[in-house]
Amino acid sequence: MWGKVARQVVQRQHAAATLPWLCRLAVLWACAAAGVEGPLATRPDAFKPIQGQPAFTIPADSRLARNEHPRFLLTRDDLSVLKARLADPRLATQFAAVCRQADRVWQAEGGVCKQALAWKLTGDRKYLELIRSSPEFRRPNFIPGWAATMDLIWDDLADAERRELSDLVAQAITRDGPLYWRPTLPLMAVFYEGGGGPHDAVFAARMKQDFDQTLVAWTDKLNRWAAGRGGSDMGHGYNGEHAYWEPLTAAIAWSHGTGLDYLSRADFARYESAFYWYHFVPGLNPLTVEKIGVTRTADDPSAVTPAHCGANHLLFLTFTRERDGLGSAWMNTFATQEPNWDRDREALGRFLWWDPDQRPLDPTTLPATRLFPISGHVVMRSDWGEHATFATFRCGRFGEIDGGWGRNNADNLSFTIRRDGPLAIDSGPVHGQNTQVLKFNGGGSDSGVPAIGNYGRQTIAHNAITFGDGEFEHADWQGQPTGEIVRRGGQSVPQARDWWTRWGFAERPADFTPGRIIAYRTHPRYDYAVGDARFSYPPQFGVEAVSRSFVYLKPDVFVIYDRMTLTDPEQRPCWLLHSLREPQANGPEAPLTPAETGPQWLLGGQGRMPHPRPGGQVAMGGDGFTVQSGSPGQAGVGWLAVRTLLPAPADCERRRIGGRDHDFEVAGVQYGLSDEGYRLADDPYAVRSTIGLLGWRVELRPKAPAHRVEFLHVLQVGSAGQQASAMAATTSTLTADTCRLDLSCGGHRYVLTLNRLGPPGGTISVDDASQPLPTTVEDNLRAYVADPNYAAWRTDPRYRVVIDPRREEQDR
């Protein structure tokens, strides 16, 4: 596949080249020998190291002090370098695309600085006039395209134009201005005039503020969140956008403006390719991420790349600086999936920063499992093939943007599983676009939409655990309700002030996180992770301890073991699994009576009303159930079989809830959608993002209240024609201290012994080779020394953003 992708990209580049073939051959030969020079920022040693802690300063010999333009994305010397890059037909092709895209009135978000660049390199005045004639020309904006364009044409503007634009920028950053609360360091760095401008005192003060908040504090926070793996403080699964390009463009602008190396401090930017690539579900056409956060749609360009406000162009700067072979493979794949109306969409970034001689790596040679320790999730797969088993497990921090519930799902301890399509899904609408397209009832935006705030972002929408049926509504500092309600025994993203003392803290700990991966190991035969989510639940729900051990026995078996201690045994825990297709019990089934389901309501266009079609709940007998992949109206070839070992069948009750008008039901209330929306249940828009129209969930509870509760499940996936033999043949042995499972899968014999008391852990034996399970996070690949790609992982720089050899040595 990867050879085909590379050939497609090269064919498209060469087909658009206009140089004679002999000239192209000569240039390519020369480029291969000498390499293609890139702009200043592509060289890691281009800027002076920062001595000590970052401090706001404008060196006297800097471009900022000299008021030399350009100095944001490019420098004056870079323009000469770019003209030289035009001699390479591969880059000339990209610039031709830039010029084609620039032949229209300038827009800062979509056009970035294409018109300005075309003007500077061709001298064709039409591009400059396309900027001047734009309604956005006199409308200052914080997105990078506006500042980058003004920077490139600064010396070409009349004095009166510069004064007018400077006045407008100064007005925009006042307290009542539209940019007052936006990060504006690149904008300030463009309009500051070396100390002699009429607004320079204001701009310098604002630069100091944005330097401290964006370039230092936010960058440091993002570096901690990425932790050498990727992710941001915008929330688990929230892909790209502001938390990528805002601090990165600040680092580029300040490095160019001062000559100091703030670009190297933006460590978080190194890991974009690995963060995205590991979240892609099998198939890769179209590129689709697993929906495990507040993502608009799972195959949207802004979900599978940073995309927002031209951020994809910045990727090529990082790829070249880091010699990132995975990044090249990622963008090459993305390029083959361009729609006809958006051809060569990354041409600007490729022309500016791409090294066409840098070879992409083959992503199928990468390790199949990756931990993201701070955001707290593990992505696992059996292999990189189209029909691979794929799973995620989540327990970590909630994002910190927007305050309150923010852009988060209350989804700690949740998991997803795929095999030839979605099986155990992350359900529910989570973005305002979802509810608009699919015609959900009720107004509002994002979490204010009833189906999002009351279902999609609640724990009940995820494959996690809830406790009891209680609710909790947060209050503000005056004791007034905020409208942020925890539904049906779920988790809470914000914390109330009195929770800290109830949890045994004097005050909020500086390093507080509601969920944590407390143990982890990846191994060629298995993956193991343990999540602790005690502080994810309101203390009122009586959760004294809750942990989940998630074990993946490769290639197709999962063991999920939950341990809970309750201060109030009446708060019975509920184990959840969601699916697009209706689960089938392996025992008798019976619809629940109205007395068993309780009152049911429908939130329709006229508000809440008694449900006109009550029901939608079925008792499921036996010790398990099976789910097919596919969509509600079209079965797939994949399947998931689930068997409950604890509690025993006689000690638990299992039911499924869902189907039409019950698919988004919480505590008897259906947060529903219109008939028009249901017609899209099999549409790729709903299915790829596993929103769950006509979907189902299985709920499992112990029958009797207890202070200590355990759930133990074995799950197996497969495709049509295969049997769930490993799961069916699993034997379990319980003692007071341990539970032991014996099973075979993938041609190997496993004995898994899990601790029932004390810290999570135990032992695992694979083909009679036994070792203790980890009790801490072992974030390394030491078990893979026999892998044929192991040497390349450690020595080939193209792998460095995925596997840092220094980190591997530290973890040994």
Image: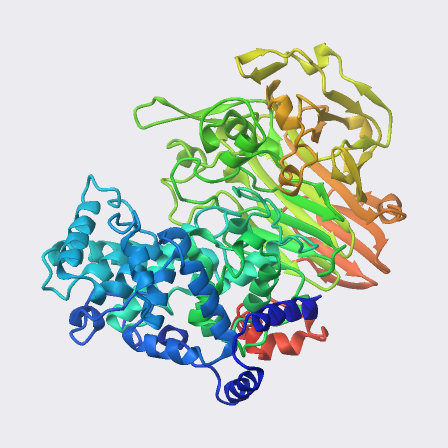
Estimate the x, y position of residue 498 in percent, counting from the top left. Answer: 39, 31
Near-viewer residue (595 or 567): 595
* Depicted 703 relative to depicted 285: above or below: above
How many badges with numbers are in the image?
0
Estimate the x, y position of residue 332 in percent, counting from the top left. Answer: 59, 65
* Residue depicted at 44% across the width and 59% down the height: 101
* Depicted 538 relative to depicted 378: above or below: above
Q: Is residue 619 visible?
A: yes
Q: Which quarter shows the N terminus? A: bottom right
According to the image, what is the colour scheme of the structure? rainbow
Q: Is residue 224 visible?
A: no
Estimate the x, y position of residue 355 in percent, counting from the top left. Answer: 49, 75
* Residue depicted at 83% across the width and 63% down the height: 768
Near-viewer residue (139 or 465): 139
Estimate the x, y position of residue 231 in percent, counting from the top left. Answer: 49, 54
Along the horizontal axis of the image, is 190 left or right of 798? left
* Depicted 360 relative to depicted 130: above or below: below
* Residue depicted at 59% across the width and 76% down the height: 794
On the image, which quarter does residue 506 sit in?
Answer: top left
Q: Which quarter shows the C terminus? A: bottom right
On the image, which quarter does residue 732 sit in?
Answer: top right
Along the horizontal axis of the image, is 584 left or right of 492? right
* Residue depicted at 77% across the width and 22% down the height: 618
Along the horizontal axis of the image, is 443 left or right of 638? left
Near-viewer residue (357 or 723): 357
